Every structure is written in C-alpha cells, then in structure tokens.
Image (cartoon, rainbow, N blue to C red):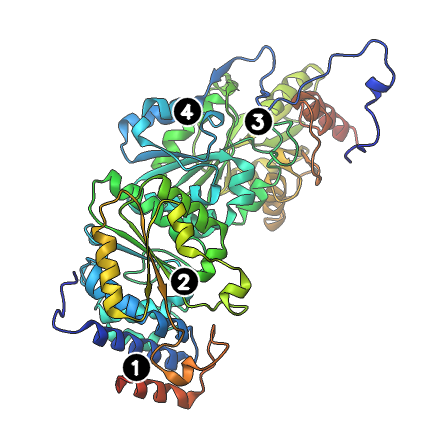
Amino acid sequence: MAQIGHNVSLSERARRIRRHALRMGEVQGQGYIAQALGIADVLAVSYFHATHYRSEDPEWEGRDRFLLSIGHYAIALYAALIEAKIIPEDELETYGADDSRLPMSGMAAYTPGMEITGGSLGHGLGIAVGMSLALKRKKSTSFVYNLFSDGELDEGSTWEAAMSAGSSKLDNLIGIVDVNQMQADGPSMAVLNFEPLGAKFEAFGWFVQRVDGNDIDALVAAFDAARHHKGEQPRIIICDTKMAKGVPFLEARERNHFLRVEPHEWAEAIRIVDAGVVT
Amino acid sequence: MRRSKYVRPEHLTHGGDRPRLTTSAMIASIAGADQPTKPAPFGHALADLASRDDRIVGLSADLAKYTDLHVFRAAHPDRFYQMGMAEQLLMMSAAGMAREGFQPWVTTYAVFASRRAYDFVCLAIAEERLDVKIVCALPGLTTGYGPSHQATEDIAMFRGMPNLTIVDPCDASEIEQAVPVLSAHRGPVYMRLLRGNVPLVLDEYGYRFELGKAKLIRDGRDTLIISSGLMTMRALEAAKHLEKDGVDAGVLHVATIKPLDEETILAECSKQNRLVVVAENHTLIGGLGEAVAATLMRSDVRPTAFRQIALPDEFLEAGALPTLHERYGLSTSRVEAAVKSWLNE
C-alpha cells in the first residue's frame, strides 16, 4: 500500500483527483476531462489501495508498475500522481505548457511516475507482457498494471498481447479496462462491437472480473481479488465507468470524448466536486 | 513489370527439350557455388556473447529457425522467448523487457519488422531510446517468394525514424564482429541479417567492423563503388573482374547506414575524375544511394558522375534468387556491366 495518508478515505482521494484534473483542464481550457472524471475512482483505488510505490523514488525497483496505455488520459494520471505526491502540486499549472513535465499526451521521458509512452493506442498491454516476463526473470514479486480503454480493444495488438499473457500464464499482470462506452467517432459499441468482453478474456485464459468502475467498494474488492487470486493466469478488471462522473452537467453532454468546456464552467465543475455532489 | 497470368511460360509453350526449372525456395542462398561460407554466424555470435552477458535475451515471432536464433535458443533455452507470430507484440514485449534492464535481441523477417510493426518499433522502442536490437532476415531481395517476403523498402522506412541505428553487414565475419559491438552500443539498432550459410568475403581484406564507420576496402582510380550489405561482396567481385579489363575500381563499404559516415564519404567523393556508383540491395528510393546523394549535395561535393545500382521502384517478381539478382541488376555480372557502360558514356 502507499506509504502516505492512510487516514484519508478513498472517496476523498477520488474527489481530489477529480479536482486536480479539473484545475489542469482549466489551465488549458480543454482536455480529456470526461475520461479523467470517469476513471478517478479507479485511480484512487489503484494508487491508494492496490499498488506499492515510493513517492520520493518513482523508479524504486520494488514498485508495482502502473502503465497508462491510453496516453490521452494523461490528465487523469497526472492528477493521481499529484495526489500521490510523485508530482508536486504546483506543477499542475504547467499542464500542457511549453517545457512542462506534463504534456497533453502521456510520455515516459517527461513525467515522473509515467512508465510508458502511450497515445498510439494498443501499446500498453504488450509492453506489460514484456515487463511481466522480465519481472519474473528477476524473481520480482511486483505486479504490472496496465490501464487501457474500450477503444483500444479495436487494436489487434491488444489481442496479440492478451493471447500471449494467457499463454505465458502471467499471474503478475493485472489489466484494467476502462469501458466508458465512448471513443473518438462515437459510442464504442457502435464503432466496433467488443462484447462479450469478459468471455473473450476468459477464453484467452484470464481471471476476469467486471465491476462498476465508479463504485469504490466494488473496486477495492476486485483489486484485492486480482492480487490474491491463486490461479496461474493474468487478471483483468473490466471497469464500467461513466464519462464525466461527478459533474452532472458534464455527464449530460452527449458527445463527450473531447469535452468543450466554457471558461465559466470550470469553476462551476470544481465547486460541484468540492461540494462532494455525487450522482 | 510483372508478367501476365494469362500467358503460359514460353519454355512450356514450345515443348521439346524443357530446361530444368529453377526453384524459388525460401532457403535460397546468396552464396556463390565456390564461395567459402559459415553457418548461422549471427546465432553463434549471440549465443557466445550471451554466455558472458546475462542481460541478453532472445525473442522470436515464430521464425527462430529462419533467423538463426535457434542456435541461441539451443545454447540458452531459458533466455529464449517465443512470442508467436505476432510482430507487434514482439516489439512491445521487447520494449517491456528493455525497460526492466534486459537487452532483448528480437528477430523476424525484415518485411514484418518494418511494414507490420513500424509503429511499435517507433513509439515503444525508438522514441524511448530503449536498448533493443532488431535483427531481421530476408532484407531487400534475398528471397524468391515475391513481395510478401521481400523487404525492398525497409531502409527507406527506418531511416526516417529518429534514434534508430541501421546496420547492413556484408558477410559472416562482419556479422560476427557486429554482434558484440552492437551490444555495447546503448540504444535501438536495426540490423539486416544474412542467415543460413553466409559467405565469408571480408576476412581476405583484413576488414574490421566499426559502428558508424565507412571503410575503404579497396582503392581505385577510375571508379568508386559505395556499397552496403551483400552488394559489397558483389562490388568486390566485380572490381576483380574489371581489373582484368584495365578498370581500376575502388570499394567503400558502408555497413552503418545511419548514422552515415559523411566525413569518409565526402573525402572519397572529393577525389576528382572518378565515377561514383552507389550499390545497394534496396529500392532506389530512400536508401543508401539517396542518402549519399543528399550528403554530397548538401556539402557542395560534386563527383565527375554519380550513378545508382538498386532495385527498381516496383513490386518484384517471384522466382529463383540467382535469376532475380540477374534480372534486377544485383548480380556481379550486372554490376560489372553497369560500371563499364557508365565509364564509356
């Protein structure tokens, strides 16, 4: 577990992650805000319940690796890394600016705690396979988490990796899929039908769980089960999340893959998150 | 131009004494009948190096036997990873292992590493300057299987990729020498591989591989052939033949395509009254020839004449390898004839 702040509740962590993301969004006036709000609970449970890391030493050999395959969710991961004190909070205002360590899309060379360069979709799960194999070679007990999205299920490379992980019985690999049902051209299932998703991974030899990705108790149980599962198989947690979760007026927007947020709306969104208004 | 599928081959149409048909076998060798060869120089060199360096792991995409990696697999079975026929995964997983401190050597065919896995070589490996060595068989025209297996544009594709070092060795001894040198170089490398029974040519010239260095293997007054990969052995053979006809041909071997040894190339091309010919086992577009031409233009160095021997900008035919090398101008006799005709222009 993380070394800091055991007394802060996971829902409070999620609230702060949403707040950090909104503040970064306000700085730039744009961003993948709906995804960040949607995945905040998953990130809170990942960073403040499930994964081992050292805030002061993001490359500590004993850490669990947390890979962000979806590079455009960088704003969400930065928010989590700020909350985890891996990135100082005052850097938040540099988000997306020239010479910032927080570029709009996540890149490993720029940001402490960013394990890989994502963005070109369908890379994360395969890199996770290589890291899992390597950690086994090193006899490490660390886990490799890979956060990817329903959109990345379109990419064939994701399925090459899924088949390989099952074939190699990578029990140190935990996949987290954010199923938010929205990608660039519209609803994910209309772009390419990926269901039945759990059955697909199960057929590839994975230990599968599917949870409400905005239900913190369910997430805690799923992460615990994934870590402690005895089977020699990779594990996947399919997280059904709601785009823009926690800010009802943004949740209501139909086309929210890349949200247009008016200048005055940022303060309103932050006010709602601060008030802890949860829908 | 490929022939029409509606026209029967002439030698069948005319009947009578049919010539023995040549084969388009995948395992066709580039070695001449009387050329000395060494078996699987890459596989042996890597297995040997791995005995001294436990960071080294070998990854294959269902082609270990056809990239000479089976020699490594036999020597170090616990350090061999079979990723299946999945070249995107091959590159991604190599990136993951490199991130964890290992030095992955991945092998497949050049077509699959370039065309199929380009994005994964680029973003997962090169952008992060990871220490992954990508070693690929069947570069350029080294198989008669047709365009599905002929990587005629791999260098053109990879030259545009920042951080990537590109090496195109000539023979068995150079491959053996390159393996430890590339391992000592930190960063991603793409090496074109000659596999199977690989000719041994350069030992006769006392050549030593140095990463990033072009080497003048033979000097010549009348013409300088700048070449890489297997075309260096063709250029050296052609030079021997040309000598008998009173033509003094030099050969500058450029094993490292990127970064290019511009200094040596410019120095050699500055010598006047020489025809400069660039010979490569690659399409005319975007390979060594155009790299050399651009270097000369940028530096205001103008040789007396500049010509290229390279594959045409076409999808090539299937057939037997010696036939195809003759047809597309890579054979020793075609190199010789081309140089002679240009000298007589």
Check disc 3 and report the residue beneath it.
B230
- Which element is circle 3 on? helix
Number of the label disc, if any, that sits on residue B70: 4
Please name whichever residue, A23 or A223, is drawn nearer the observer in this view of the structure. A223
**Labels 1 & 3 near each other (Cβ < 8 A):** no
User: Closer to the camera: disc 2 or disc 1?
Assistant: 1
Residue type pointed to by label 4: His
**Labels 1 & 4 near each other (Cβ < 8 A):** no
Q: Residue furthest left?
A: A7
Q: CA distance from mark 1 to mark 4?
A: 59 Å
Label 2 vs 1, first from the N-terminus: 2
The reply to the same-chain question for discs 3 and 2 is no
Image spot of residue A138 (x, y percent): 23, 40
The reply to the same-chain question for discs 2 and 1 is yes
Please name whichever residue, A138 or A36, is drawn nearer the observer in this view of the structure. A36
Q: CA distance from mark 3 to mark 4?
A: 23 Å
Residue type pointed to by label 3: Leu
The reply to the same-chain question for discs 3 and 4 is yes
Horizontal side of B12 relative to B121 (left or right) equals right
What residue appears at the point 23 percent right and 64 percent down from the top-left corner? A220
| Chain assignment, label 3 | B
Check disc 2 and report the residue beneath it.
A71
